[in-house]
Image (cartoon, helix red, strand yellow):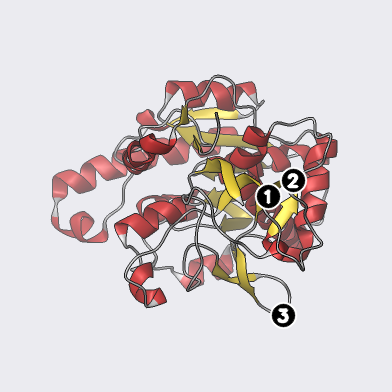
Amino acid sequence: MEPLFGSWEANMGHALERTPVDVCRQRGEDRMVIGNFAAVRVVRPGRAVTRVREGDLCLTQAFARTDEHGYVKLVHAYDAPGTIGVLARQTKIGEHLLLPLPENSRYTPQQWAASYGRYWTAWDNWRVTYACWMSQVRRNPAELDPRPLVFGWGGGVAVAELELAQRDGFVAAMASSSPKRLAEIEAKGMIPVDRRTFPDLDHDEGKFASDPEYRRRYQQSERVFLRTIQELSGRRGAAVIIDNIGRPVYRATLRALGRQGVLTTVGWKHGMRLETARANECIKRHIHVHTHACRFSDIEEILEFQEESGWMVELGDQRVYQFDEIPELARDYASGNLDSYFPLFQINVQ
């Protein structure tokens, strides 16, 4: 197969930075080709292949190894040994890891490539999160007054999940420091929260204990953030907080979460190890949800849901990086120098 349009994912940055693990060392290999998610064209099927045909447009799947329930254990082109990613101009891949696109899809291959890795992760995480919240509250969020708040930290996954939260009757809000992203958040009917109003919300326990000036600036930003959440939630705290950032915002996030609230995550951009005061979490009946990707058996259902419901990213005039610009894309992603939550690159496109 040959990749056409690919999505730059967080795990690609982790691989390049060799953090939180060195995946080459973990795989026992000197080098690897990264890249999990792309819209690709089938070039030449093997003799025994029946799922796809020459010329088919497909989405690659990252399910290199799954557990007995279909959840991913090892990720294709990341920690699964011997797997080759979509930054190769051509490569072989097992047919079970190709999902054919609908022949008459109303969406472009670019939209599918940009969205599905993040949207499908969001679909799975929201399904679990919503079930956890309902297990305690047992009320339709659309019927509550005020309607409960779901707040998001992160990028494209958080955006997609907040869209699902809106469909289920919640008020959705998301933080960003980019004027363009804040405008996009507002255009989706969400409440944009300007991250620049609490610029020092970056918690570091060591500095907090030893540096009085750092502690003063942090506490001021935390107060502004908590006041913002209280105003948006009718002084009840957030019902759900999607936190795909981690350590810098973890302390403030737990303080912003209301009773019977759910803290949910699918990622760990900054900091894999976090400390929690378990007594506080028990008393407030907080549920912590951790998920990763989705279930292999759900991918066709999610694709159909997107096609039928209109739950899809709008790309507008965003930049698509060329093959020889991918190192620049990697640097822009690492530095946060991207206007879009859904960074795209293209290969084998004339």
At a point 47% along the width and 69% down the height, the residue shown is 79
Q: Is residue 239 above or below residue 76?
A: above
Residue under the point 20% across and 61% down: 206
> Upstream in the sequence, badge 1 or badge 3?
1
Residue 224 in the figure: left or right of residue 80: left
Query: Quick one: quadrant of the C terminus?
Result: top right
* Residue highlighted by disc 1: 42
Residue at 82%, 53% (x, y): give it.
301
- Identified by mark 1, the residue type is Val
Quarter of the image holding residue 130? bottom right
Labels 3 and 2 touching (C-beta < 8 A)? no
**Type of amino acid under label 3:** Glu
Task: Judge whether residue 238 can be spotted in this image.
Answer: no
Q: Is residue 136 left or right of residue 202?
A: right
Secondary element under disc 2, as helix, strand or loop, is loop
Q: Residue beneath label 3, please?
A: 68
Mark found first going from the N terminus, 3 or 2 = 2
Helix, strand or loop under label 1 = loop
The mark found on residue 56 in the picture is 2
What's the amino acid at mark 2? Answer: Asp
